[in-house]
Image: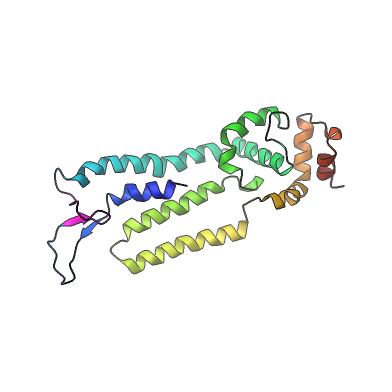
């Protein structure tokens, strides 16, 4: 939830411009627009001292964090683990060691917070959310001298995010659990069979998976 804020704060250090009075007078120096008392690109200034820290923070958190999540969520084997874990969630299983499958339980404990809101085939969606936020922060900095174009790029960022979300409908609410299980009943049944889960002891799961 703090990703966008941290990116904006880090990039604010590089967001410099001239301060022009109401009379149109300027001293031709550049100042941090978020903190106009700090002069930019002057040896020994606060802004110059903050630049390396801000650059490291943006590279580590703004760029490195999405790359870390991508390395976790995108490999085919990990995507399958995420999908299976979400199938168990839709079938109201997997939130405890007793109701989970052994090889999924450790994965669930470590990474389920990254994808628990999404459908089994959309567990990577958090990466698109981070991309939207990163583009918003970058557009705010890069096009600061042209407010009209800046607004246009921000609207474009929101528009593509809206289109792909409404097209893919990635979120899995509790209301949709039944439909997700029904549409994936063969995959869920195969998962249970491969791991020796006895459905005969669970009438709810047996009925749901078999569609009876």
Q: Residue at x 22, y 56 (%)?
A: 36
Q: Is residue 176 above or below residue 104?
A: below
For the residue pair 22 and 169, the one nearer the viewer reads as 22
Confirm whether the magenta stretch covers residue 181: no
Q: Could you say where residue 52 lies in the image, as x and y percent from the top left?
A: 26, 40
* Residue 166 lies in quadrant: bottom right
Q: Could you say where residue 204 lies in the image, as x and y percent from the top left?
A: 82, 41
Residue 122 is left or right of residue 207, and the answer is left
Residue positioned most to the bottom: 23
Magenta range? 30-42
Q: Could you say where residue 150 lies in the image, as x and y percent from the top left?
A: 36, 64
Q: Could you say where residue 59 lies in the image, as x and y percent from the top left?
A: 36, 41
Q: How many marks?
A: 0
Q: Is residue 91 above or below residue 154?
A: above
Q: Residue at x 61, y 60 (%)?
A: 167
Q: Main secondary structure of the magenta part?
A: loop
């Amino acid at each position: 939830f703090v990703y966008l804020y941290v990116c904006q704060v880090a990039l604010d250090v590089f967001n410099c411009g001239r301060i022009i009075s109401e009379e149109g007078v300027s001293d031709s120096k550049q100042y941090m627009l978020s903190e106009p008392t700090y002069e930019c690109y002057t040896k020994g200034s606060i802004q110059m001292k903050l630049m390396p820290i801000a650059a490291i923070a943006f590279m580590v958190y703004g760029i490195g964090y999405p790359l870390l999540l991508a390395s976790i969520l995108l490999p085919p084997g990990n995507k399958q683990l995420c999908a299976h874990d979400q199938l168990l969630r839709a079938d109201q299983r997997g939130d405890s060691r007793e109701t989970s499958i052994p090889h999924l339980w450790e994965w669930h404990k470590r990474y389920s917070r990254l994808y628990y809101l999404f459908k089994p085939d959309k567990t990577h969606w958090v990466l698109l959310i981070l991309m939207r936020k990163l583009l918003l922060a970058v557009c705010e900095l890069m096009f600061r001298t042209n407010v009209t174009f800046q607004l246009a790029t921000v609207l474009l960022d929101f528009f593509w995010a809206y289109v792909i979300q409404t097209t893919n409908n990635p979120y899995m609410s509790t209301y949709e659990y039944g439909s997700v299980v029904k549409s994936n009943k063969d995959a869920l049944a195969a998962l249970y069979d491969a791991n020796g889960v006895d459905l005969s002891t669970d009438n709810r799961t047996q009925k749901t998976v078999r569609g009876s």
